[in-house]
Image (cartoon, grey):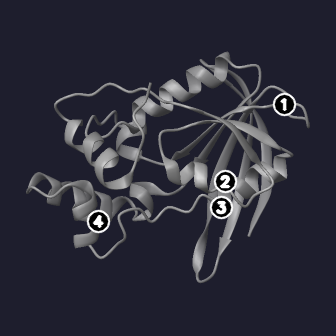
Amino acid sequence: MIKRAVTSRLPTQYGEFLLHAYLEERESEAALVHLALVRGSIDSESRPLLRIHSECLTGDLLASIRCDCGEQLDQALVAIGDAPVGILIYLRQEGRGIGLLNKLRAYNLQDDGLDTVEANIHLGFKPDERDYSVAVDMLEDLGVVAIRLLTNNPNKVAAFERSRVRVIERVPLVVSETAENANYLETKRRRLGHMRGG
């Protein structure tokens, strides 16, 4: 259950956006606030470039290079800023949905030799706990009917299969591979089915 709570103008280095905050009501848990940053006008003819980005405090805010999240967010905002119409949906699903504390515990397990999938399973979670149906609901509320989806993740493409929003193109997202994130990126490709960028 989501509802749009407030809309504000947000000027950024990537351009000016309308920032829509959505409340997701959850049984027996505090409501989550998800964000939709919209650039340009949405109508039945628009085909916005869309990035669904799950919260990653360590990558997005603290510039961690253990993952590719911060670079993905920056590249997505650059691309959306350059597009005639674009949307970035920021979902509060830290650590593939396991939360910040468990993500940090998973970091320690990775330092002991487990990959990111094995670490999540060791902590009692599925390899990926995220749910993209909230993003679909947000887009439907915004009146979006078709998108160009900026992703390498097949689960994000699949999230739209039974929705009113059509994916007309998948746009790859190319990130840098470093000594710190090489195993992480390979695990995403080998074990989670992520496609290579480019």
Residue occupying the point 8% across, 57% down: 112
Q: Which sits earlier in the primary sequence, circle 3 or circle 1?
A: 1
Left or right, 2 with reference to 107: right
Q: Which amino acid is tagged 1?
A: Ser
Above-or-below relation of 109 to 80:
below
How far across and down, in percent of the image, does residue 60 sit?
43, 38
Which quarter of the rendered picture does the N terminus lie within? bottom right
Could you tell me which secondary element the residue under label 1 belongs to?
A: loop
Camera-side mark, 1 or 2? 1
Q: Quadrant of residue 114?
A: bottom left
Categorize mark 2 by other alpha carbons within 10 Å: few (<14), some (14-19), many (20+). many
Camera-side mark, 4 or 1? 1
How far across and down, in percent of the image, does residue 128 sit?
41, 62
Give the numbered dot on residue 133. Answer: 3
Q: Which residue is mark 4?
A: 120
Give the numbered dot on residue 46. Answer: 1
Q: Which sits earlier in the primary sequence, circle 4 or circle 3?
A: 4
Q: CA distance from mark 1 to mark 2?
A: 18 Å
- Whether tag 2 and tag 3 are in contact, CB under 8 A, the answer is yes
Categorize mark 1 by other alpha carbons within 10 Å: few (<14), some (14-19), many (20+). some
User: Can residue 143 be seen?
Assistant: yes
Q: Which amino acid is tagged 4?
A: Asn
Could you tell me which secondary element the residue under label 2 belongs to?
A: helix
Left or right, 184 with reference to 143: left
Could you tell me which secondary element the residue under label 4 belongs to?
A: helix
Q: Which residue is mark 2?
A: 135
How far across and down, in percent of the image, does residue 69 sit?
40, 38
